[in-house]
Amino acid sequence: MAGWKAGDIPDQTGRTAVVTGSNSGIGYVAARELARRGARVVLACRNESRGAEAADRLAREVPGAEPEFIRLDLAELDSVRQFAATYGQRHDRLDLLINNAGVMALPYGRTADGFETQFGVNHLGHFALTGLLLPMVLGTPDARVVTVSSGMHAVSNIDITDLNSERRYRRWIAYGRSKTANLLFTHELARRLAAVGSDVVAAAAHPGYASTNLQTAGVKLEGRTAAERFIRVGNRYFAQSADAGALPTLYAATAPGVRPDSFTGPAVLGWRGSPATSWRAPWTLNDRAAERLWDESERLTGIAYEGLKA
């Protein structure tokens, strides 16, 4: 991985990629660089005007690219179902599913389906999306599912008895739990894919400390808490760019030899630098926890992964 950069992405001609949250930041960079290497990219974004503008911008920046925008709101399971249906009507393959979209450290709120917002968007929305698109993923040779987590997963394990933070809500703990859920999902998805002999690779990545609108979209940087003060100072002095932050995701999505259930992040202290194997908390490799989260996610979303039963 040493020194790996966007120019090292293998040729993606003939491959189709869905990137959630790709109207800006890391998601946009990932979609743009995949398009540069020949992939047909689908921008899956909540805001219609921003999604359409991002598709237009990408087409200008990558001559010959034909990016497509399909609306996706991960906070509404009906929207997730509609996205999957629309995608299935327009496409017959899915080589890369990059579960990138997310929210961070929001005040307490609920999704349209009643889930705590961070858990609902960051985990359940992507769980449902992956499940609905899975038949197409399984039918595409050498496909990959890459889910973007965070080093902040180390803040907290999930509480399987209180996934929606109903007993007590602390927004940074809730964010960390949602990112732990991303890793447990990847762990269990990789296990189930292996059990049926699939060559689909489920992997995870994180951007390190990248300055994007994720922080400012979810956190008003007024210095009211230590975490907010840290972000305000860090974004100014320490953070790497969105282009650099996207490299671990792009590596996990395209580099030869990426292993199932791997976790890729920046090489230097997990904060910045070229992609490298990243440390992860031991609880993200707990088979029983991953299975219980999977079962609860199927129950909550109503999405069953046909063909990948335990």
Image (cartoon, rainbow, N blue to C red):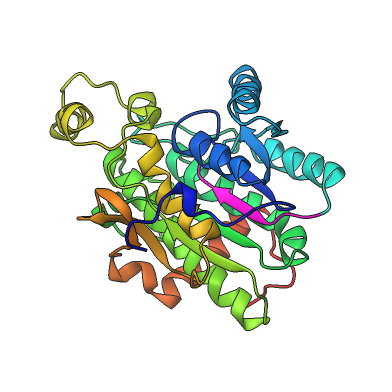
* The N terminus: image quadrant: bottom left
Give whichever of 32, 146 is nearer the camera: 32
Counting labels gives 0
Range of magenta residues? 93-101
**309 lies above or below 240:** below
Position of the C terminus, as image quadrant, is bottom right
Q: Which residue sits furthest right? A: 89
Q: Is residue 103 above or below residue 285?
A: above
Residue at the spot 83% in from the left edge and 53% down from the top edge: 92
The image shows residue 265 at horizontal and vertical percentages of 34, 56
Q: Residue 147: horizontal and vertical position, in percent?
A: 50, 54
Among the 4 quarters of the image, the one containing residue 233 = top left
Q: Where 269 sits versus 235, above or below?
A: below
Residue 11 lies in what quarter of the image? bottom right
Percent coordinates x, y for residue 222 in the rendering: 20, 18
The residue drawn where x is 36% and y is 42% is 244
Q: Is residue 200 visible?
A: yes
Q: Is residue 230 magenta?
A: no
- What residue lies at 20% left-to-right and 29% top-to-bottom? 228
Percent across and percent down for residue 302 are 68, 54
Determine whether 33 is above or below 202 in the image. above
Q: Is residue 99 magenta?
A: yes
Q: Nearer the viewer, residue 123 or 71?
A: 71
Q: Nearer the viewer, residue 46 or 33?
A: 33
Residue 170 visible in the shown view = no
Left or right: 69 as drawn, with respect to 45? right
